[in-house]
Image: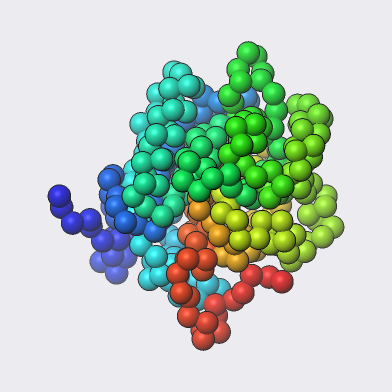
Amino acid sequence: MTEPTQRIDSHVSPRYAQIPTFMRLPLDPAPRGKDVVVIGAPYDGGTSYRPGARFGPRAIRAESGLIHGVGIDRGPGTFDLIDCVDAGDIDLTPFNMHIAMETAQLHLTRLLEHNGAFLMLGGDHSLTLAGLRAVADKHGPVAVLHLDAHSDTNPAFYGGEYHHGTPFRHGIDEKLIDAEAMVQIGIRGHNPRPDSLDYARGQGVRVVTADEFADTGVRGIAELVRERVGQRPVYVSVDVDVLDPAFAPGTGTPAPGGLTSRELLGLLRCVGDLTPVGFDVMEVAPAYDHAGITSVVATEIGAELLHQYARAHAPVPTTNENNRETPR
Ligand SMILES: [Mn+2]
């Protein structure tokens, strides 16, 4: 066994140089004892409209070189607080959803046997079910903070039980999710079936529409999340289409009227007050992107989640005036 390498030193190697890992983290395909492992899930066999999310992980990594993990609004550097690596991608067949799902679940379960948590870079949203199965296997039914334009609690379409519009219905049906401790934020637009929201609400999920988010604001919704989720283990799933297409055009099912980048990143600051056990950032489809807008914001979302994991699980010095609290 060789010692894992260090992050690429940006004082030596410019941020656009070298083979990109996420945020220039060390590449370690078989990580042990890490706090959070970044893992790519290049798969889009569950997409219902624009395909292409299989290229998401690669595009996110390519744009992530600029992000330091230290910010004037963050305080201590994330990687001074927690130990993270990039484990590369899960090898997922493009030809068979069931095999891909099983492969992803097995891989994520193994990661959690040896490490604290994962940050999965999608890939379409169907694979969140694999993530939920893996975290529930370790922690029992989890709370969920789900950011998305769509509820993703649909029934089968075209004879397919599993696709990117169903992971949370299966997650609830399989009792991977504590539905009373699940919040969906940003829901809007043209869900294929209005009754998909009835399902979520009927199970006790708190659905925050984009309109309610706009009316209430970041602070109020962050408080709602803290109250709902409490200190239960929580899985945070970000479908990048929660953002308005102005901020994330490169995605499979864009829906105008969404959150701004600033709103989403502000809201995610509440995650450090919870007990996060797994993350994903899904549905980046680079073929529809412009100037890397979507990949850049996906990187920033991932960076924020890693930092919030550090806030929740590592002792963050409180004397630093710049270590701004979550909006309250
Ligand atoms: Mn989704």
Q: Is residue 147 left or right of residue 41?
A: right
* Horizontal and vertical percent position of residue 318: 52, 82
> Does the image show residue 203?
yes
Residue 281 in picture, x, y percent from top left: 53, 46
Left or right: residue 50 compared with residue 228: left
Viewer-proximal residue among 168 and 267: 168
Q: Residue at x 69, y 23 (%)?
A: 155
For the point 76% across and 47% down, the residue is 206
Residue 232 image position (x, y, % from top left): 60, 56
Q: Quadrant of the C terminus?
A: bottom right
**Up-down relation of residue 121 to residue 52 (above or below):** below
Q: Residue 294: in sight, yes or no?
A: no
Name the one closer to the observer, 32 or 100.
32
Report the number of numbered marks. Answer: 0
Task: Give the quarter of the image for residue 260.
Answer: bottom right
Query: Residue at the front extreme?
Result: 140
* Pick the front one: 21 or 10: 21
Identify the residue at horizontal 71%, vertical 56% (top origin): 228
Which scheme is used to colour this image of the protein? rainbow
Q: Is residue 185 above or below residue 166?
A: below
